Amino acid sequence: MSVLLDISHMDMEFPNPKGAFTALKDVNLKIRQGEFVSLIGHSGCGKSTVLNVVAGLYQATRGGVILNGKEVLEPGPERAVVFQNHSLLPWLTAYENVELAVKQVFRKSKSKVEMREWIEHNLNLVHMGHAIHKRPSEISGGMKQRVGIARALAMQPKVLLMDEPFGALDALTRAHMQDSLMEIQAELNNTVIMITHDVDEAVLLSDRIVMMTNGPAATIGEILKIDLERPRHRLDLADDTHYNRYRAQVLKFLHERHSKPDVRTAPALNTETNSVDTGSEPDKTKNKNTERTDAVVDAA
Amino acid sequence: MASTTLGNGRLAALRLPRLDGSLLSNSAKYMALPLTGILVFLLLWSFSARQIDTSLGKFPGPAAVADQFEALYREHQRSREKERAFYERQEIRNAKRVAEDPGYIPKLRAYTGKETFIDQIGTSLVTVMSGFLLAAAIAIPLGIAIGLSPALNSAVNPIIQIFKPVSPLAWLPLVTMVVSALYTSPDPIIAKSFLNSLITVTLCCLWPMVINTAVGVAGIDRDLVNVSRVLRLPALKHVQKIVLPASIPMIFTGMRLSLGVAWMVLIAAEMLAQNPGLGKFVWDEFQNGSSDSLARIMAAVLVIGVIGFLLDRGMLTLQKFVSWDKVASQ
């Protein structure tokens, strides 16, 4: 399979009163057609920045993104984004939210009837066929996220970008959503980049897990290839030795190499916290601060 | 010692159930308490009115004002009757002239009786709505443009901040002179006085709408803007599909503030410039100085208050119909 998306030598600096803040430094990643790639790392490490540059919402300071041989310069529906907080327009129903996207993308190529069928097809795909005329305020968080995914899928994107799509959901709903996503993925074979905090989610869904070092000047620390057969079932995998080894590897990276990629350190103080979900800390800034102090301790 | 204890015990037995929210039924909350408030107000008003002696007699109490309400209404009916009689007479006269001389083209003259209280209410309402709508037509697009463009915001903001606190009374002489200078049609379709009031109202009620619309537009959720960018919505569609619905609650807040300002400004403008309307009615009664004048002014004050309240309620009802955000329009 050929390379569909090429992130090469991407630097990202944000202007700052005290000079530029370097968020990303030399990020390189090649993604093939149909691949499911997860980006994992601590809060504030720049995962979202990578995704936003690929989406075209930010422009990289140096380097850039090439999709299908063309440089990404602006946002567009061929790189549909599923935002963490669903981002549905609250004044439109589920149907109308998807319709807005479909009308924009297919206004020249589909007839009215085809568009309606396509909207309904995508809502059915995410199991939202029963609530297509409900507004976001009338449905649950998981259902909103389903509609958000339907809207993104309905754009028929070359790459589907998901920014912690299930981060705001409870564990049970999240598991349902992951299963749904795997089903859809098996059917459509989309190319997906997903940001996650959840190690289990990353291992369960991904073909490759891209682990990022901490910022500032964050970059890719390690890439882990997940060689598990599909379809994957979470219950079967719970006792699978390969699955658990992958999981342990990701955890180990997150706990040990949370500073620069070349700074190998002894297991940090917090290794005993066997937290699987590194995103579970409610206060992200606080989390960031503790990471920073860890880094200082490590350096010393 | 024993007797006091007994006394306390008796008092406790006689104590009424506490009048807190849980004991009051809904109808009491929504009807009885407001009615009690109004009743107490009327009593206080009636009592204090009797203590005040003015050069036009005692300050009017509720009863005197109620009498004047009735008198004003009867005056209105009488005037309408006169008007009808006038047109009847004119018609008969014209028919006669035409019968005598078939080549005669009848002249139709309009009735020019004094405007009644109820006519003045109508004039004021038409003026305030016209001024408000003109202001909204300018302010909402301008607010959207300012909200979308930080550069435009920086450019326009000082001007808004300077003009916002200006009293309508300061604008009025300028508006009057400018209208007289520019609007020089020999047979004006719109009265100059109406234009003066309208423009003064517009100038004063522009600002709350501009500011609130701009704040609403500038504060749209980044993610919704990003959705629009990913979909590559063209600018006009972006405004229509994302910006306008997202800022509707703030636009309505601005509109309600503006309408309140507009109504206050209008009465002042009408008083000062002798433009027809409720303000002119108040001023005329003040100049008239009859023994009924104060009661009639008080009647006008109440009507002005009730109309102001109804305008705000009307706006809120409109918001409920238009806005998707049912919480904001409670």
Image (tube, coloured by chain):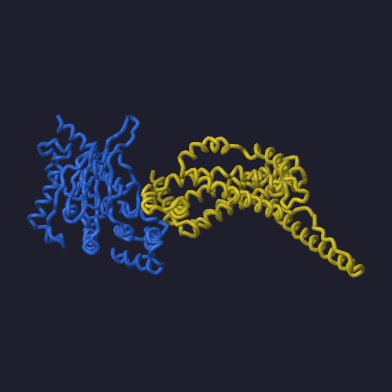
* Picture coordinates of residue A70, whole percent (x, y): 30, 49
* Picture coordinates of residue B270, whole percent (x, y): 69, 45
Relative to B122, residue A261 above or below? above
Foreground of the two, A77 or B265: A77
Say if residue B28 shows up in the picture. no
Left or right of B233 on screen, residue B165: right
| Chain appearing in blue on the rendered image | A
Residue at the extreme front of the image, as rendered = A69
Say if residue A224 shows up in the picture. yes
Residue at (40%, 58%) from the top-left corner?
A104
* Picture coordinates of residue A34, whole percent (x, y): 22, 57
Residue at (41%, 59%) from the top-left corner?
A92
* Picture coordinates of residue B140, whole percent (x, y): 53, 48
Left or right of B88 on screen, residue A224: left
Residue at the extreme right of the image, as rendered = B100
Q: How many marks?
A: 0
Residue at (54%, 54%) from the top-left corner?
B315
Foreground of the two, A238 or A34: A34
**Quadrant for the N terminus of chain B in the image:** top left
In the rendered image of this protein, which colour is used for chain B?
yellow
